[in-house]
Amino acid sequence: MKHVKLFGKFALIVVPFVALVVFLITVMGVMTSRSREAYVTALYDEAYTASGALINADRDLYQSLVAVTEAHISGGVLTADEKQALVDDFNKNYQQARDRAEEAANTIMSKTEVYEELTINKLSSDNGNEPEETPFQDWTYKDIYTEYVEKLDEWHGMYDPATELGDYYAQLKAFDGVRDYLDAMEIFMDEYAIREIADADRGIKLNKIVAYSAGCLVTVICILITVYIALYMIKNLREIKNNLVRLANKDLSFDIKMNNARDEIGDMSRAAGTLLGNFRDMISAINESSNFINESTDNMNNVSSDVNNATSQIVVAVGEIAEKVSNQALDTGRASEQTKTLEEVVVKSNETAARLSEIGSAINGATRKGMEVVDKLGNDTKKSSEAFDSIFKVIEEMTVSANKISEASSLISSISEQTNLLSLNASIEAARAGEAGRGFSVVAEEIRKLAEQSSDAVTTIDDMLLELNGNVSRASAQRDIVMQAVKVQEESVELTEGQYREIVDNSAKITAQVSVLDDISNKMDTACKEVVEIVKNLSDSANDCAANAEETSASSEHIMTNMGQIIELGGDVHHYADELKNLLDEFTM
């Protein structure tokens, strides 16, 4: 049954209906025939009743005549009782003849047309019979009956057997005339019964013809309507099927001709048009999303490359800082040694003034060397400060780049969610399309997987960015400490330089101011202690700076590793976007 064409299915619907119509027509014919039989039976019963009443009236009339004749002939030999019995029979039979005629008249009296308008001649003509030659052939039943009653009463009054008054022979002669009325009424009832049966047959035949004609007409109309509906549905369903086949073959380059009918066919046609429009919009949206993902991935890769390059520069800069800090620590050690030498010189200057000139020369030499060291230390400190400024600028740039990456990651996540939503909508529409949407359902599933992979990649990027931001925050937190240490180092260098310049000035005055040697020695001793403390602090700061530089270098290398993973993930996203675009290229727009 499921492999039968639509036209055949409609035919299977119509055939039982036609059979039902034929069956109903047959049943109607049988019922009509039975109704005729019942009607004819009722009519015969009515005619039999009337005819029987008329025959009985004729018999009663005859019995009345017999009674009056016997009373008249045997009047002299009858006893009073016998004569009275004959008189009673005469009157009784007269009355019965009158009543039975009235009974027959009552059977058709309610039918005004029959009782007052039809004649024997008319009935015989309607029945196709030659009318009998009677004086009553143009009389109505009413006329015959009325005249019969008058004639019967007149006949009854012609002679009274009880009193023997009247003309018996006139009564006897009038008897046949009265009976003629009864015969006329019998003829009328017979012709009436024949005509009624013929009318009933014609009516039943006409009803059968009308019923058969109506049944045939209804059957033909139903067949024509069914054929029209079948052709209409087959045409429109075939067009809808062809459109769905083209959709299943990924062809979106055609336009669906809408059916404006307000039935299921029209709804299916409009739904197919809406489905085509949604497919086009969805494919366009996915195509744009794919292009946008490619562009975003390229931008992310570019930003990641910039961050990677910046991180490489940070690593190089941190390495330089570490090297310079190491040199600074060595210089600070040498300064510490020079300070000890100066302290020994001050001690020795207190022991002997005679060697003042020689010690002064030594102090001048040491001072010059110290100044060189201090100048170098000052230059190194300025370079270290500039290097740290570069480092922190790179860290700030890295923060900006990380924010850009975060924005791009959020954008990719949003696109992934939209793509997943589009995939869900596509799956729903494919499920509605049934078998025709199965191919597109596979595409929608692949899109959903790509969206999930993009979402996972975005999650990985966010985790890496979170770690990167943490490292940047820690590096930024070390900035103030490093800058403070550099500032202290610069102040220490400036202080050391001032002390050395003071030493130079004092050394120049040693020769002229031997008298104040003790005071100067004390001052030098105090200054040497301060220089020792400052140099010690400077050495500690240099060591801390070196440790921070190593931590910064390690963080930068970790950032470079994470950025490499981001670049690889960006390549994977770009690859999936290309695969998505290749799938979309299979659709003909």
Image (cartoon, rainbow, N blue to C red):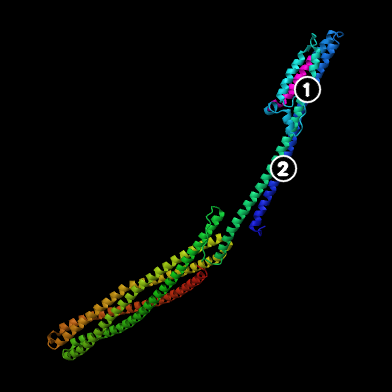
Q: Which percent across, then down, holds residue 281?
A: 47, 63
Let me know if residue 147 is in the magenta part. no
Residue at x-position 82% and y-position 18%: 63
Local secondary structure at mark 1: helix
Viewer-closest of 572 and 535? 572
Q: Which percent across, then down, holds residue 471?
A: 38, 72
What stretch of residues is rendered in magenta? 90-111
Tell me if mark 1 has few (under 14), some (14-19) or many (20+) residues whose alpha carbon lies within 10 angstroms of its own.
some
Q: Disc 1 residue type? A: Asp
Q: Nearer the viewer, mark 1 or mark 2?
A: 1
Label 1 or label 2, whichever comes before in sequence order: 2
Alpha-carbon distance for marks 1 and 2? Answer: 47 Å
Task: Give the number of callouts.
Answer: 2
Left or right side of 21 for 67: right
Q: Which residue is mark 1?
A: 180
Residue at x-position 59% and y-position 58%: 235
Q: Which residue is mark 2?
A: 27
Viewer-closest of 459 and 272? 272
Local secondary structure at mark 2: helix
Q: Disc 2 residue type? A: Val
Q: Which percent across, then down, holds residue 108?
A: 71, 27
